Every structure is written in C-alpha cells, then in structure tokens.
Image (cartoon, helix red, strand yellow):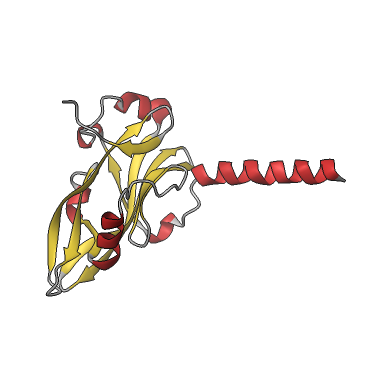
Amino acid sequence: MKKIIIELLTLLFALQVYSNSKASVDFSSLESFQVHEYDYKHGDNWNEIVKNNSKLFIYYRTDVYKKACFITELYYVLVHGKEKTILGGFNIKQGFFDKSLNYIFDNSDEEIRFRNQYLLGLSIDTLRHPFSLYGIAKNTEGNAYKTEILKAFEIDSVKLSIVKWIPDL
C-alpha cells in the first residue's frame, strides 16, 4: 500500500512540474503578436530559441485608467505547432514570473509595495520593446505616468525561461 501511495505522489509531482511549463492559460481571451528577431535586443541566442520552426509570441490583456491604456497580464509564449509553452510573464497581482511560475523578480519590499500601491500595469510600449519593460503607475494625486524601466529580460535558451538581463560592462 505504501508503495502505491509513493508512486501516486511521484506521478502527481511529475504532472505538476510538467504542467507548470506548459500553457495552462486560456489564450483565447488575450491579444497577441509575434516577436521577431529584431525585437530581441538583449540576447544573441535567437536562433536557439526558435529552432525547429518554433515562434515566440506575446499574449497580453489591457486595461484603462483615466485614459491611460496599460497591460495587466503578459505571457512570453513559445509556440511549436499546436503546443504552447509559457517562458515567463507578468500579472499585476503578483508581478513578474519565470517559466516555473516562480515570482522571483520582485527582489525587495520596496518593489512589492510599489507594485501593490502605485503600479497599474506595463506600458503599451512593451509591444514595441517586449524585453525592456516600463510601467504605468499612478502618483499620489492619482494621475497616471510612465515609469523608468521596471525589468529587462532575455531568454535562457537552455531552460527556455525568461531571465533578468544584466548588461555587459
């Protein structure tokens, strides 16, 4: 009996790990666009990312606050045939996440406080520069403004996950 329970738990764990990297989001309710090599500014591994005829897409949802349009949900998705794999993304409630859905990119209490109190979402400029992400926030008077760069990403072509981009110095 113990052996069956252990095997069942192992199977459930394996399914959970597998499902975390596969698309489990209803993309039909989101807008999308295809990312091309010229959009990928921070890395030099584009051909490794899109090997075997894969294509990279951004799926996103927008909202409006006082005439300011912004992105509240965003996914970097690698599409190969009918299979969609989430490489990472953003949602306004929890912040930036990697392929394993780990919210590891908000490193400080100050970043978390800013997101919770002031950040409305990501700038629509994200659609032109999908790896250098600006925010749209509200100031103390309640007016919307564009922030400095919140995060910059590249894609780890081995893990197939977004990773924080750190410039070569």
Relative horizontal placement of residue 125, taking residue 111 as reference (left or right) = left
- Looking at this view, name the residue that lies furthest to the front: 109
Q: Position of residue 118 (x, y in %)?
A: 22, 66
Q: How many marks?
A: 0
Which residue: 22% across, 69% down? 64
Relative horizontal placement of residue 132, taking residue 87 as reference (left or right) = left
Which residue: 30% across, 65% down? 116
Considering depth in this image, is 24 or 134 the residue closer to the camera?
134
Relative horizontal placement of residue 147, taking residue 15 as reference (left or right) = left
**Quadrant of res 93:** bottom left
Which residue: 13% across, 58% down? 146
Considering depth in this image, is 19 or 53 the residue closer to the camera?
19
Q: Position of residue 139 (x, y in %)?
A: 14, 68
**Image quarter (top left, top right, bottom left or bottom right) of the C terminus:** top left
Q: Position of residue 55 (x, y in %)?
A: 36, 36
The answer to whether 126 is drawn above or below residue 47 in the figure is below
The answer to whether 169 is drawn above or below residue 106 in the figure is above
Considering depth in this image, is 106 or 121 the residue closer to the camera?
106
Q: Position of residue 101 (x, y in %)?
A: 45, 48
